[in-house]
Image (cartoon, rainbow, N blue to C red):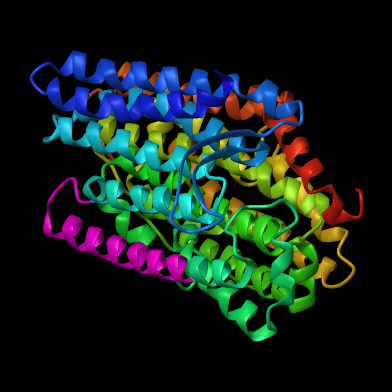
């Protein structure tokens, strides 16, 4: 029965999706299916943690493909379960938030919205559960296709243009992904994700391995590393719950999750060092961290500032993986859920601000902290966490990344300085928002005209963002909430031989 748990988990959104379509004329029932499916999936995903923590791997093979050595099915390890717990837990909260948001703005095509939301989570959980590259690819592309209708939801010329750019980038990445998978299979006869890497790759020529690695990097444009990042700010034309889905729950996290998989489960430490690819990857990540932060500083639109912040923050995960040290990879793995909870809070706050006040630009938000204090307090807490300031969980993942950089034999001090500089830039683009909201006087009050009474966003929006903000602090106090810290340690133990037994 335990072996079927992954199948039951992924069936939750698959079954809910058609039920949502059938309940089009009954909004409460339609959204009820979304909540029931999200809670059931999270419970099933979480139930797998004790077995994984005992050192076992859960396999669920559906069928064998025509290619020898490749099965279509799931193989859940500790790292995959971290991503699955992050996605499934946040799906519950973003679903509740979506109900409040869509109803408050009387959005059109709500049934279509919730349907594709379900399908997107099928892709995300499938990626987390994939035991080989082919299964990973299939669910990765399901995630791409299902999120396109969400990006163009508004159906304005701007939304359609943003959606086309989004689709073009990510489908192009899919082509590179398929090519890299074919190369891997040709060279090794397998596409299994193996802790420590696929040993047979070591016999391939240096040039082929380097080309294949760059194909994998291009495959994961979802990670928004520069210069292949512009689809992400453009996709901010989507409704705020979709932005939260893109930035915290599914799409970009699938990208960085994939890069960590390639580094640790396809190439491995020795090959990454031998080919010098770790330094190339670290250089790309460092460049993206710094430049992404400078772009964020220049944005007045709140969602776009958060989008460029995401571009920068995702590269912390890539950088930690590139270090190829125990602490570096631990920091990268921890930053996946911790960033997820913090960033989804920030985006939900942005949507709540827009619903409550109608304001989208930071320059217009003077004094709103006194008008919608719960929303802005949640925003401030998680903004501190993004900067790496305690008592928010971002401090923990960043400190491990700093330890990872410090333990490098070469370039350690340079990468440590880059992490600290990037964190300082986080302060520069987040603190003005907090200052504007709480300490600047609203224009209406200065001019004597005043504004109508502004109140907090609907309760369906306010409760989820409050919960995620609270969890961002809980993770700092007790990092093993939802088994996160133990799962990270288990994943590192599986990779233990990579680090000389560390």
Task: Locate residue 116: give its quadrant.
Answer: top left
Say which of 271 and 434 sits in front.
271
Q: Which residue is drawn at 21% across and 48% down?
A: 149
Task: Locate residue 357: give its quadrant.
Answer: top left
Q: Is residue 467 above or below residue 490?
A: above
How many marks the image carries: the answer is 0
Residue 162 in magenta? yes
Say which of 380 and 325 sits in front.
325
Residue at the extreme left: 25
Q: Is the magenta stretch mostly helix, strand or loop?
A: helix
Q: Residue at x 15, y 27 (%)?
A: 21
Percent from the top left, x then y, of residue 196? 75, 55
Percent from the top left, x then y, of residue 234? 31, 60
Q: In the picture provided, is 487 more to the left or to the right than 303?
A: right
Q: Which residue is drawn at 36% across and 20% down?
A: 37
Q: Which quarter shows the N terminus?
A: top right
Residue 255 showing in the rendered view: yes
Say which of 283 and 193 sits in front.
193
Q: Which residue is drawn at 58% across and 39% down?
A: 75
- The magenta segment: 152-179
Percent from the top left, x then y, of residue 136? 48, 51
Percent from the top left, x then y, of residue 158? 17, 59
Task: Locate residue 258: give its quadrant.
Answer: bottom right
Q: In this view, does 12 lie above or below 140?
A: above
Residue 373 showing in the rendered view: no
Q: In this view, does 81 lie above or below 69?
A: above
């Amino acid at each position: 029965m335990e072996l079927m748990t992954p199948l039951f988990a992924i069936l939750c959104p698959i079954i809910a999706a058609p039920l949502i379509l059938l309940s089009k004329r009954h909004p409460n029932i339609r959204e009820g299916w979304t909540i029931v499916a999200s809670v059931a999936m999270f419970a099933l995903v979480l139930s797998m943690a004790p077995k994984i923590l005992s050192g076992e791997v859960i396999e669920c093979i559906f069928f064998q493909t025509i290619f020898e050595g490749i099965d279509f099915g799931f193989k859940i390890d500790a790292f995959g379960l971290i991503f699955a717990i992050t996605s499934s837990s946040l799906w519950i909260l973003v679903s509740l938030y979506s109900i409040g948001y869509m109803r408050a703005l009387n959005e059109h095509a709500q049934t279509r919205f919730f349907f594709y939301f379900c399908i997107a989570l099928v892709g995300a959980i499938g990626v987390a559960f994939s035991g080989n590259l082919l299964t990973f690819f299939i669910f990765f592309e399901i995630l791409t296709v299902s999120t396109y209708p969400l990006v163009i939801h508004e159906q304005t010329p701007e939304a359609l243009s943003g959606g086309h750019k989004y689709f073009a980038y990510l489908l192009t990445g899919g082509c590179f992904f398929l090519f890299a998978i074919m190369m891997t299979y040709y060279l090794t006869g397998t596409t299994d994700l193996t802790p420590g890497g696929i040993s047979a790759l070591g016999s391939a020529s240096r040039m082929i391995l380097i080309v294949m690695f760059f194909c994998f990097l291009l495959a994961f444009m979802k990670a928004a590393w520069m210069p292949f990042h512009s689809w992400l700010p453009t996709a901010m034309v989507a409704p705020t719950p979709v932005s939260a889905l893109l930035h915290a729950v599914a799409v970009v996290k699938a990208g960085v999750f994939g890069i960590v998989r390639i580094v640790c489960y396809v190439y491995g430490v020795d090959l990454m060092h031998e080919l010098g690819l770790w330094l190339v990857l670290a250089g790309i990540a460092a460049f993206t961290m710094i430049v992404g932060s400078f772009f964020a500083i220049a944005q007045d639109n709140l969602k776009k500032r958060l989008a460029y912040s995401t571009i920068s923050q995702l590269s912390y995960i890539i950088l930690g993986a590139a270090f190829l040290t125990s602490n570096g990879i631990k920091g990268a793995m921890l930053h996946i859920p911790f960033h997820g909870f913090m960033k989804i809070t920030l985006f939900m706050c942005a949507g709540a601000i827009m619903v409550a006040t109608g304001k989208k630009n930071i320059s217009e938000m003077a004094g709103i902290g006194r008008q919608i204090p719960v929303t802005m307090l949640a925003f401030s807490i998680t903004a501190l966490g993004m900067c790496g300031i305690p008592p928010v969980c971002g401090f923990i993942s960043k400190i491990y990344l700093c330890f990872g950089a410090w333990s490098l034999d070469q370039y350690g001090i340079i990468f440590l300085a880059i992490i600290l500089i990037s964190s300082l830039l986080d302060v520069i683009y987040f603190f003005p928002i907090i200052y504007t909201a709480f300490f600047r006087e609203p224009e209406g009050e200065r001019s004597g005209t005043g504004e109508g009474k502004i109140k907090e966003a609907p309760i369906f929006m306010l409760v989820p963002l409050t919960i995620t903000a609270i969890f961002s602090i809980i993770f700092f106090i007790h990092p093993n909430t939802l088994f996160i810290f133990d799962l990270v340690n288990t994943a590192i133990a599986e990779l233990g031989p990579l680090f000389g037994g560390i």
